[in-house]
Image: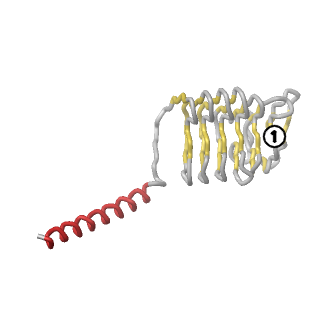
């Protein structure tokens, strides 16, 4: 009887370890390939609406995403958050926050904060990219509108497209690392910035 118990115990342990290792390897292989396509999002949240961790890469193409008391999008990791289009609103905080060493890349859409910065790139090693470096600069998209700042930057900020609005002296706070070749940053009297 003791040999049967030992056999069952050893066999159960082998099955458990095998399933655990296979499950771990399977989860690891799919952890970077999750993808959702053709989904129209309308998300209203009290806290962070989209919160990205670790080395995850997220691509957002459209939708209406808002938070009443925190960020609409927060990158707390080392991955890339790519915004292809959509409307993003934070009623009481920075709308888009790049908190870590990751990248926020905004190709199109409208980013609005009713209280703070529309975009806050808060880490010295974080990267913010507005538009695409393609030889032309759009003066309308993406549209960045902040109450205290349009863009508050402490890291790398590459400005290729778009219009940035905020208080007259605070539409862009911090350095702009790179702009579209052959263009200059234009600041209007009301504090709007665009490339020309």
Q: Position of 120 compared to 3: left or right?
A: right
* Residue occupying the far right of the picture: 189
Relative to 25, does residue 112 appear above or below in the rendering? above
Q: Residue at x 70, y 26 (%)?
A: 114
Q: Which residue is mark 1?
A: 173
Mark 1 secondary-structure assignment: strand
Q: Residue at x 27, y 68 (%)?
A: 14
Q: Residue at x 56, y 49 (%)?
A: 53
Q: Position of 83 compared to 130: left or right?
A: left
Relative to 165, does residue 16 appear above or below in the rendering? below
Q: Residue at x 23, y 64 (%)?
A: 12
Label 1 neighbour load within 10 Å: few <14, some 14-19, many 20+? some
Residue in the foreground of this view, choosing between 145 and 8: 8
Here the colouring is: secondary structure
Quadrant that contains the C terminus: top right
Relative to 61, does residue 14 appear above or below in the rendering? below
Q: Position of 130 compared to 52: left or right?
A: right
Residue in the foreground of this view, choosing between 54 and 112: 54
* Residue occupying the far bottom of the picture: 3
Residue in the foreground of this view, choosing between 94 and 59: 94
To which quarter of the image does residue 163 belong? top right
Position in image of residue 185 (x %, y %): 83, 40
Relative to 149, does residue 102 appear above or below in the rendering? below
Position in image of residue 148 (x %, y %): 77, 31
Position in image of residue 22 (x %, y %): 34, 62
Residue in the foreground of this view, choosing between 167 and 187: 167
Quadrant that contains the N terminus: bottom left
* Residue occupying the far left of the picture: 1
Q: Position of 64 compared to 98: left or right?
A: left
* Residue occupying the far front of the picture: 2
Q: How many marks?
A: 1
Position in image of residue 35 (x %, y %): 46, 46
């Amino acid at each position: 009887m003791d040999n049967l118990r030992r056999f069952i115990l050893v066999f159960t342990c082998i099955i458990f370890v095998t399933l655990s290792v296979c499950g771990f390897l399977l989860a690891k292989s799919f952890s970077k390939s999750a993808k959702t396509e053709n989904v129209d999002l309308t998300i209203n949240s009290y806290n962070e609406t989209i919160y990205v961790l670790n080395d995850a890469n997220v691509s957002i193409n459209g939708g209406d995403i808002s938070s009443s008391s925190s960020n609409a999008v927060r990158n707390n990791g080392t991955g890339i958050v790519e915004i292809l289009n959509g409307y993003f609103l934070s009623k009481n905080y920075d709308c888009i926050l790049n908190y870590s060493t990751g990248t926020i890349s905004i190709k199109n859409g409208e980013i609005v904060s009713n209280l703070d910065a529309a975009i806050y790139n808060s880490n010295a090693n974080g990267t913010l990219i507005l538009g695409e470096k393609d030889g032309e600069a759009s003066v309308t998209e993406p549209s960045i509108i902040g109450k205290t700042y349009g863009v508050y930057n402490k890291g790398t900020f590459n400005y290729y497209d778009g219009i940035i609005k905020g208080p007259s002296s605070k539409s862009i706070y911090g350095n702009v690392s790179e702009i579209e070749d052959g263009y200059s940053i234009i600041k209007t009297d009301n504090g709007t910035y665009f490339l020309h």
